[in-house]
Amino acid sequence: KENIRACYHQLTNLCLEQGDYAAAEKYLAKSREFCVEPQAVFATCMTIIRLRALQRQYSDIQNFTSKAHHTPFKDDSSQSKIYAAYGLYNMATGRYKDAATSFAQVKPQDLGTAFSDLLSPQDVALYGVLCGLGSLERTEVQQKLLDSQTFRECLDMAPQIRDLAIDFCSCRYAACLASLEKLKEPLSLDVHLHGQVANLCEQIRDKGIVQYFAPFLSVSLHRMAEAFNTDVESMQREVAKLIGQRQLEAKIDSHRKILHASHADHRRSTYQNALRVSGDFLDSTHGLILRMNLLKHDFGVHLVRQKK
């Protein structure tokens, strides 16, 4: 059985290299009938993941990645491929935070040549950084991506992406966004990322604006426009959008072009919380007193059992 499975597996790989995905699908289905050993099951799952990713049918990747993840007797290189597959699925479905976490655990030397047509270490660095910048806080990007020994190896193979992440974490937003703007056109040709480029770039810019304003009570829109390399009116529209989406707790002084942080009235909320707790306590106390009085006066419905 193993020899038959190996032959079908080689035919599948040959068809994948030739781009004949229909034939690869046929041989792959036949090879699954002869999978017995855990290593064979894992190899088949990885081949299915490659085929689905090349066909851009990302919905099926999760099922086979989960199956591969629960296959026994895996080594470290196998685990890295699983993390890469999870990251690709999460990125394609818009779960950028989960994708960044998965890509951060991929070791570049473990991907091997068999996975190179799907993901290279440079791709892992690119996808991990963009997903991280669009979904993680600045401290999390520093800790999980830049300071990670595992992910640092991927970043060293993509210095432009590494510098982009460093600029973001160092609050050099104009340089970071300028580099990102230069990458937009080549990213739009990426086989896996092209459908996510506009959304990711918008999320990265929004995240930068929110994190820039976080330490201030008020800041000039002129200063923010300079930091984000845009004009004041465009900056005001972007800030207004973020306020409308409740990503930014602030108010705009459109006359003086100043953005003021709007803080919640903690004293009022404390009093309201105290009143709510006291009301709940009174209700529960009245309920207990009522129940005690009912039991005391034997006031209740008694069920009488009838003899058969």
Image (cartoon, rainbow, N blue to C red):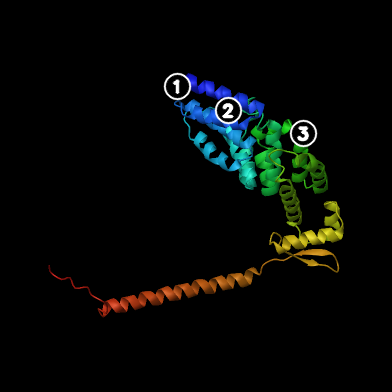
Give the residue type at disc 2: Ser
Q: Quadrant of the N terminus?
A: top left
| Residue 119 on image: x %, y % | 66, 32
Res 155 quadrant in image: top right
Residue drawn at 60 percent across, 41 percent down: 58
* Mark 2 Cα shell of 10 Å, populated few (<14), some (14-19), many (≥20): some
Question: Callout 3: helix, strand or loop?
Answer: helix
- Residue under the image location 52 percent in, 21 percent down: 6
- Tag 1 near tag 3, CB within 8 Å: no
Mark 2 or 3: in front is 2
Q: Residue 233's spot in the image, x, y percent?
A: 85, 61
Q: Amino acid at mark 1?
A: Lys
Nearest-to-viewer mark from 2 and 1: 1
Judged from the image, the secondary structure of the residue bearing numbered disc 2 is: helix
- Residue at image coords 53%, 24%: 8
Q: CA distance from mark 1 to mark 3?
A: 47 Å
Circle 2 is placed at which residue position?
Answer: 77
Mark nearer the viewer, 1 or 3: 1
Q: Earlier in the sequence, mark 2 or mark 3?
A: 2
Q: Quadrant of residue 234?
A: bottom right
Of the numbered discs in the image, which one, if any, rests on residue 159? 3
Image mark for residue 1: 1
Q: CA distance from mark 2 to mark 1?
A: 26 Å
Q: Mark 2 or 1 closer to N-term?
A: 1
Q: Amino acid at mark 3?
A: Pro
Q: Could you give the CA–CA distance between mark 2 and mark 3, rounded to whole angstroms?
A: 24 Å
